[in-house]
Image (cartoon, grey):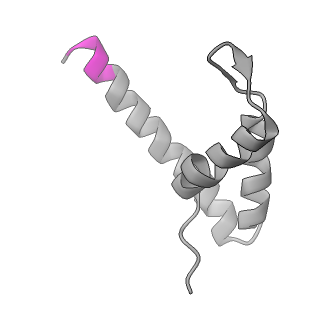
Amino acid sequence: MSENQTLTKSGETTALILRALVAKPIEKNVLSPDDVEALLLDTAGGFDIDGGKLTPEATRIIVKEDLAPLFLKPKSE
C-alpha cells in the first residue's frame, strides 16, 4: 500500500470516528442538531482557505452544504 493510500484510508477512518463521536451525544439528546451546526460554524469560521479566512457567508455555505450533512442525518419530513 502506498503512502497516499494509507493517508486516504486513515482519513476515512478518522471521518467515521468523528461522525460516530458526534452521533452519540445527539442520540442521547446531549447535543441538538442546532448545537452541532453552531459548533461547525464556530470552527469553520477560523479556516484559512486559499490564504485567507472565510467570510461569514462562505462559512455558512460550507457548513450547510458540506459539513453539516456529514454529521447530521437528514431531517425527516
In the image, residue 51 lies at what x, y percent? 67, 12
- The outermost residue toward the bottom is 77
Q: Residue at x 78, y 33 (%)?
A: 55
In the image, residue 35 lies at what x, y percent? 79, 59
Q: Residue at x 30, y 17 (%)?
A: 4
Which stretch appears magenta? 2-6
Q: Quadrant of the C terminus?
A: bottom right
Q: Quadrant of residue 73?
A: bottom right
The answer to whether any part of residue 56 appears in the image is: yes
Q: Quadrant of the N terminus?
A: top left
Horizontal side of residue 4 vs 18, given as left or right: left
Numbered disc total: 0
Q: Is residue 1 above or below residue 23?
A: above
Q: Quadrant of residue 41?
A: top right
- Of residue 57 and residue 19, the one placed in the foreground of this image is 57
- The outermost residue toward the left is 1
Q: Quadrant of residue 74?
A: bottom right
Horizontal side of residue 54 vs 19, given as left or right: right
In the image, residue 72 lies at what x, y percent? 58, 62
Q: Is residue 15 above or below residue 1?
A: below
The answer to whether any part of residue 31 appears in the image is: no
Decide whether residue 33 is among the magenta residues.
no
Q: Residue at x 59, y 47 (%)?
A: 67
Which SS does the magenta portion mostly show? helix
- Of residue 1 and residue 69, the one placed in the foreground of this image is 69
In the image, residue 22 lies at what x, y percent? 63, 54
